[in-house]
Amino acid sequence: MADSRTNRVLIIAEAGVNHDGNIEQAFRLIDVAADAGADLVKFQTFDANALATANAELAAYQAEASDCENSFCSGQLAMLQRLQLSEQDHMTLIAHCEARDIGFFSTAFDLESLDFLARIGAKRFKVPSGEITNLPYLRRIASFQKDVIMSTGMADLDEISEAIACLEAAGLPKDKITLLHCTTEYPAPIEEVNLRAMHAMADTFGVAVGYSDHTDGIDVAIAAVAMGASVVEKHFTLDKNLPGPDHSASLEPDALKAMIRGIRRIECALGSAQKQCTASERNNIQLVRKSIVAARAISADEVFSEENLTVKRPATGLSPMLWDGVIGKRASRPFKPDEVIEL
């Protein structure tokens, strides 16, 4: 999913439902993501009635973070109904993304929402962790023949394997799949992050991997890039203290900027797999390497030995790697102390 020519990490700023059902707030989230330098800003597309039953309870983190006075904590359905974006909302947000030169992205949570995103020209699709065991959903998303980013929170390798098999059986080439390691808790306990699972997935399935980060702070997301993540996704908000299910576990604008700046620095530092002297290092070779020099005054025709030779900076004469070939030879002329040896 990263650009194969530049190895540029795809950074997804996850606005999610942090717009709280307010389109102006959604505009401000787009502005924050664009100003921070994200590649994509991601929302969520769903029909609340198609997503949850009336009896579906809130997750513990949602109940703790929700504003009961605004009906957020009366159950999932009531919460989702408040956070649902209309089709017109989507078109308005896409136009604002275009104006701010940032890509619009959204996760669909039901079949009708998938079809809607396909109709409006979505270039890629996201399988959220909760849908990795949803066979009809996987078949529908594969039918679009677009790049698919699949979060793997709560899943083991067997479940991931089955989901990939479903996508492939429905006609999606494997090279269009990117797996995101994820720990589905908000915030994710640091001892449960297990970034090495990215390597396990890459080795097992032979696909691109990335990381969907639910930890506090920005260090784990940056570390994931150092470990090979080609995609990083992170929730952000205008203010962690806003009412709503995801604000408290999201980055505020300055932290989002810092994370993206850190990721770009790390991807630049990763470089290539070659080990060689760099352009800036060449200037230091002569200064910090050494030459074979006279340890004391040496007369002409004297035999070079470990007693009359040593090695010192700078590297303007014979390399110390030639030491064994110099020992035992005779001096062609007198040498003063510290003078570089010539054969």
Image: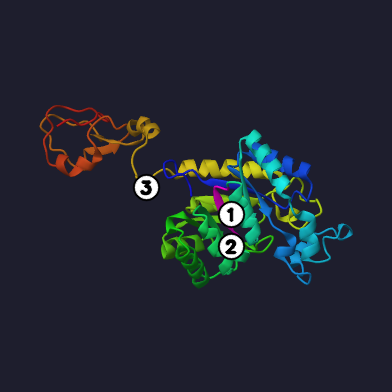
Q: Could one spot residue 280 in this view of the protein?
A: yes
> Which amino acid type corresponds to the residue marked 3 in the rendered image?
Ala
Question: Does 8 sit left or right of 91 as displayed?
Answer: left
Q: Could one spot residue 194 in this view of the protein?
A: no
- Element on which disc 2 rests: loop
| Residue lying at 12% horizontally and 34% vertically, measured from the top left | 302
Task: Check the image and report above or below for 101 versus 132.
Answer: above
Mark 3 burial class by Cα count in 10 Å: few <14, some 14-19, many 20+: few
Instruction: Identify the magenta region.
Output: 122-128
**Mark seen at residue 304:** none
**Magenta stretch: residue 224 in it?**
no
Task: Tell me whether circle 3 and circle 2 mark residues in contact (CB < 8 Å).
Answer: no
Mark found first going from the N terminus, 3 or 1: 1
Mark found first going from the N terminus, 1 or 2: 2
Marks 3/1: CA distance?
Answer: 23 Å
Task: Tell me whether circle 1 and circle 2 mark residues in contact (CB < 8 Å).
Answer: yes
Circle 1 sits on which residue? 220
Question: Does 19 sit left or right of 132 as displayed?
Answer: right
Circle 3 sits on which residue? 273
